[in-house]
Amino acid sequence: MTRLPVSALVGLSFTSAYFLAALFAPLIAPYGMAEIVGDSWEPSSAQFWLGTDSIGRDLMSRMIWGGRTTIFVAACATLLSFGLGSILGFFAAVRGGWVDQVLSRLVDLMMSIPSLISALVILSVMPVTLPVLILVMGVLDSTRVFRLARAVAVDIAVMDYVEAARLRGEKQAWIIFREILPNALSPLVAEMGLRFIFAVLFISTLSFLGLGVQPPMADWGGIVKENKEGIVYGIPAALIPAFAIATLAISVNLVADWVLNRTSSLKGGRGA
Amino acid sequence: MPDPQHPLLDIRNLVIEATSYPPGEPPKTVTLVHGVSLTLEKGKVLGLIGESGAGKSTIGLSSMAYGRGGVRITGGEVILNGRDILKGGAAGLRALRGREVTYVAQSAAAAFNPAKPLMEQVIETTLSHGLMSRAEAEVRAVDLFRQLGLPNPETIGRRFPHQVSGGQLQRVMTAMALCPKPDLVIFDEPTTALDVTTQIDVLAAIKRAIHETGVAALYITHDLAVVAQVADDIMVLRHGRTVEYGSVQQVIEAPREAYTQALVSVRSIDHVEKPEAPPLLSIQNVTARYKGTNFDVLKNVSVDLPAGQTLAVVGESGSGKSTLARVITGLLPLGQGRISFDGRVLSPDLAGRAPEDLRQLQMIYQMADVAMNPRQTVGTIIGRPLEFYFGLRGEAKRQRVQELLDQIEMGAGFADRYPAELSGGQKQRVCIARALAAKPKLIICDEVTSALDPLVADGILKLLLDLQAREGVAYLFITHDLATVKAIADRIAVMFKGQVQRYGTKTDVLAPPYDEYTDLLLSSVPEMKLGWLEQVLAHRRMEGAGN
Amino acid sequence: MAHPVMKMVAQRVALGLLLLLAASVLIFVGTQILPGDVAQSILGQSATPETLANLRAELGLNEPALSRYFTWLGGILHGDLGTALSNGEPIGPALGKRLANTLFLAGAAAVIAVPLAVLLGLVSVRYRNRWPDKVISAVTLATISVPEFLLGYIVVFYLAVEWRLLPSLSTVYDGMALSERLYAVGLPVIVLVLAVLGHMMRMTRAAILNVMQSAYIETAELKGLRPFAIIAKHAFPNAIAPVVNVVMINLAYLVVGVVVVEVVFVYPGMGQYLVDHVAKRDVPVVQACGLVFAGVYIGLNLVADIVSILANPRLRHPK
C-alpha cells in the first residue's frame, strides 16, 4: 500500500467522484430532476453547462440525478447478486453432493438463456418499478457470481490446509470463514467491480429500450432515449451519458485490477 | 571443419541474468549465473549437478543460445565447433538448434505436441534441416526406437503422445534428439519425473544410446548418484557459481569442497532400529476403494506400528501408499477390516472420531506450500491446535508457540511471518511444529521430503528423528525414496498395486531373500558409486538367463 | 471417425435438446406463473370484471398451468407458435421473416468480426507487450465499456450525420438488391462488429498465448524451426479448438447485442419485434421470441462444445 499506481489513482478518483455526485445529487444539481428551465436542446452556456434536453430541462442536472438513479440501481443489484451468488456458491462447494448438483444445474439452466432476453420476458408480465428491476437484475446476474464463487471455493476446498483443518476436527463455520473465505476474497472483490459495471450497462440498456427506469425519473439510459432524436440534427445530447458510462466502467475496472493485484501480492500467492 | 585441437563446446565466463516482475513492485534484475566456464570434448558426457536455483538448466540451454522467459545471456562466450554461437543471429541459431545441438526435456509429456503423431515429431528436424529423405529418416527413427528398447519400434511412431507411458515418452524424446545425428545433446533431468524402477531402464537406454552414437552430452540432474552412472566429468553448481569441477571419479570418490562432500554423504544418517514392542497403530485386513469406482486401491492390508517407532510405507506411484494414509485419517472410509489405535478401534469415518483421536493422530504433507493457509501467520498456524485442543490463549499460547519454534530450530521473529516469506525447508518445519503442537502419539508423514533439495531434506529427517527421541512420537512415513527409508525406519512395508508385498523390521525387509518386486525396487535405487548401473544390469541379465 | 467421439457428440446434442426443453419451461414459468396477471396487464387498470373474465377464458388462463404448457409446447413442435394478442395474427410467419432479417444482420457482422478479431488477436500475440498490443488492448477496453446503443449513436452522429457516409436508419424491404441491403445495414453492422470485437479479440489473444507458452512450442523453437513452421505445425492445430470456442461464445453474445442495435436503427428484426411486444405485454409473442433466442444461443454453445470434442487428440485417438 506504499505507492498507488497512476492507473489506480485515476480509477479511484473518477469512481469516487461519480459516487459522491450520486450521493449528494440534491446539493450539487443546479436544477430539479424534472424541472423545465429553458427551450429544447439549447446549446451549452454559462447557465446550462451541458445545454438543455429535448423538453428544455437542464442536462447537467438530469445527468447528476440520472447518475444517482443508475448508480443506486446498479449498486443494489450488485449487492443482491453478490450476496445471493457467493453465499449459494460457497454453500454448494462446501456441502457438495446433491445440494451442489441441484444448484449448479439450475444455474446452468438460467445461463442457457441470455440475461437480457430473460429480463425482457419477465418484464413483459411484471410491473416495471425500481424494486422489480433490482430484483430481476440481481437474481439473473447472481448466476455468474455463483459460478465464480463455487469454482474458487472448490479450488480452495481441496487444498491441504483445508484438509488439515478438517482433520483437526474444525467446525464447518471455521472452515468457511477462516480457511476458505480469506483466500477467496480477492478474486471475488475484483469480480464485484465487473458485476457492477455489468449492472450499469444492463440497467442503461433496459431504460434505453423503455423497459427500465420510467420517466420522468432520470437515468443515463433514459437520457439517451429522450434525446436520441436530436442525433440526426447533429445535437450530441444523447452522447453525454455514453461518456459518463464509459468513464465509470473504465475507472471501476482500473480499481478492481488494482485491488486484485494488491491483495494477491500482499500475502501468499507468491510462494509457488 | 572445426579444428580437432579445440573442444566441441567451450563456455567461457558465462553470465546470465533474468528480469522478474513481482506484482506491485518495480521489475528486478537478478543474476542467475555468475561467470561459469566449462569445456566438453567430442563424445564425452559432462554432468551438471546442483539443487534448485543452481542455474544448471539455464547453463544447459545457453549452449543452444536459448533463455526461458525473461532469461538473457549477458556476458561470456559459448563456442561450439569453433564459433561463438551468441554472435550467430537468428538464422545462425536456427541452423544450429535441432541440428548440431538437441534437447531432451524433463517432462516429455508436455514437450510433445499433443496433436501430432510421434514419428512426425521425431523426424521433423531431420527433414527441416534437409539431412535425409523422409524414408531414410523413418528408418533411422525406428532403429533408434529399437536401440532405446521401446516396444513395437516399427509402429510406435504412429501413436500420439498421450497413448504411450511416461517412461516410453522419455525414450521417444531421446530418439527425437538423436535422430538428426547431433554433436551435442542436452539432457535436462530426463529421469526425474519417473518412478525409480522405470528410471533405471530409461537411464540405461540413454547411456547405451550415448555410447553407441558417440554423441557428446550435457547431463543435468539434481541427483549425484544418477549422474555418476553416465558422466565422464561432473560440475557441481550452487547459486549460479561453480563449486567443484572434475572427473567423475574425483568428484564422487574424493570430493574437495565441503558442499560436494555433503552432497556425496547425504542420507548417511545412522539410525539404530528399535526393538519389537506392542503396537500403537494396528491395521488389520484393510480394503478400500474410491467412491464411484469398482476397483480396490487397497487390498487386504495389515501392518503394525509400535509407539515411538517409525514405519516406512514405501512404493511407487499407484501403489496405494497415500491412500493408506487417507484411510488411517478417516478421509477415505475403509471398506473392510479395521484400524485400532492406542487400544481402541477407530471409527472408519472422520466425522465419527472423538476429538481425542483427532488430536493424537496428526499429519504432515508433501507440499508444505499448500498445507498452510497463505493468509495466516506462522504464529496463527502453530497456535490454532493449541487453542483448539488445549484452550490455550494469550500469553500462554504465545509462549508455547515460541517453545515449538525453538524445537524446530527457528528463531523468535518467525511467529509474525507469512508462509510465502519462508524457504521450502522452513515451511516444512512449521508444518512439523503444527503437528507437534497437538502433542500427538502418531504423525503421518506423506512424502514430506520429496519436494526438498537433498541437503534440506536431510535436515528435516534429522529433526524428525530428534523429535522422536525427545517426544516419543511414532511416525508412519510414506515415501517412494528408499534412501530415506534406510535412514529413518524401524519397520518397513513395501507396497505394490494396493497390496503389502513385504513387511517386517528394517533388517529383515532389507535382507535377502527378496521377493521379485522388492528385489527390483531395491536394486533400482541409484547408488553413489561408479559402475553401479552396469553391475545391476549384469546381475539382472544373469538372473534373466537363469530363469 | 472413432466411436467414443461420436458417442460424446451425441450426448452433447441430447443435453442441448434437454436444455432447450428446460429453457422452454423456464420461459413459460417466467410469463405465466409469476405474480403478474397477464389479462390485467393487457387491459390495464380500467378493465371491468367481465372483460377480464372474457379475456382470461379466451387466453385459456382458467386451465391448469401444466396443461397450458403442454398445449403451448405441442403447438411449437407442430410449427405453430401461437397468435399475437395485439393484432390477432399468427406469430410464425411474422417471426420467420424477422428472424431472417436478424440472421442477415448478425451474419454480416460475424463475417467481418471473426476474421478481424482473430487477426488482431494474432497481431497482439506477435507483438505482445509492445505498442501494437497495447493500442489494440486499450481500444478494445474502451469498446467493451460502452453499451451497444451508445456505440450506435456515436456511429450515427459521426458516420451518418456529420460525414453522411451511411444512412442512419436501416430500412429494408422485400425485393431489395443485396448491395442495397448491405448499404442499409452498414451502420448496425459496424456497431455489432465493434461490440463483439473487443471480447472476441481478447479471448482469442488469451487462447493463442496459452498455446504459445506450452512446453511443446519451446521444443519446436529448440528444434530450430522457422517461426512460420512453429505457428503452422505446432501452434495452429492446438489453438484451433480454443479459438473456435471463443468465436462461438461471442457469436452467442452477438445474438443478444442484436436486440439493442435493431432498436437503435429501427431495423425490422427479431430484437425490435421482441422489444415492441414486451412494451405491449403481448405474452405469446414474447414467449416465442424468447424461445427462438434461447435456441440460437444454446445451439451456438453446443457447436462450440462439439468442436472442442472433435479437436481433442486425446478423444480422437483413444488409448
Image (cartoon, rainbow, N blue to C red):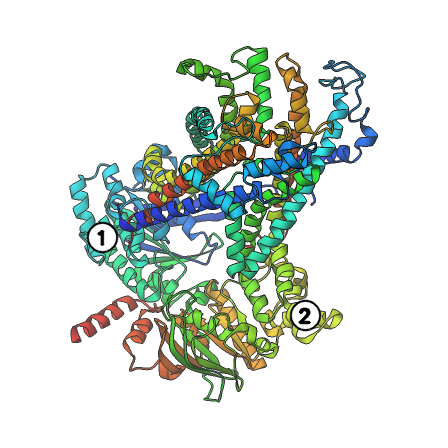
Which residue reaches farthest right? Answer: A27
Report the residue at 38% width, 81% height from top: B503
> Residue at position x 22%, y 59% from top?
B149
Residue B422 location (% of width, % of height): 59, 59
Callout 1 environment at 10 Å: few (<14), some (14 to 19), or many (20+)? many
Q: Is residue C101 above or below residue A87?
A: above
- The residue wearing badge 1 is B156
> Quick one: SS at disc 2?
helix
How far separated are the C-alphas under marks 1 and 2?
59 Å
Task: Tell which of B409 and A58 is nearer to you.
Answer: A58
Amino acid under label 1? Ile
Q: What's the chain of the residue with tag 1?
A: B
The residue lying toward the viewer, choosing from B226 and C132, is: C132
Q: Is residue B36 shown above or below B149?
A: above
Image coords of residue B539 (percent x, y): 23, 72
**Residue A48 horizontal side relative to residue B325, left or right:** right
Q: Nearer the viewer, residue B175 or B375?
A: B375
Earlier-in-chain disc, 1 versus 2: 1
Tell me which residue sits at (75%, 23%) in the image: A60
- Image location of residue B8, percent across then percent down: 30, 46
Residue C21 position by quadrant: top left
Locate residue B232 relative to residue A249 in the image: left or right.
left
Please tell me whether mark 1 or mark 2 is closer to you in this view: 1
List x then y, in percent, for residue B379. Answer: 66, 65
State the quadrant of the C terminus of chain C.
bottom left
Secondary structure state at the residue bearing disc 1: helix
Q: Badge 2 sits on which subunit? A: B
Tag 1 and tag 2, C-beta contact below 8 Å = no
Mark 2 Cα-neighbour bin, 10 Å: few <14, some 14–19, many ≥20 = many
Q: Is residue B530 above or below residue C154?
A: below
* Residue under numbered circle 2: B402
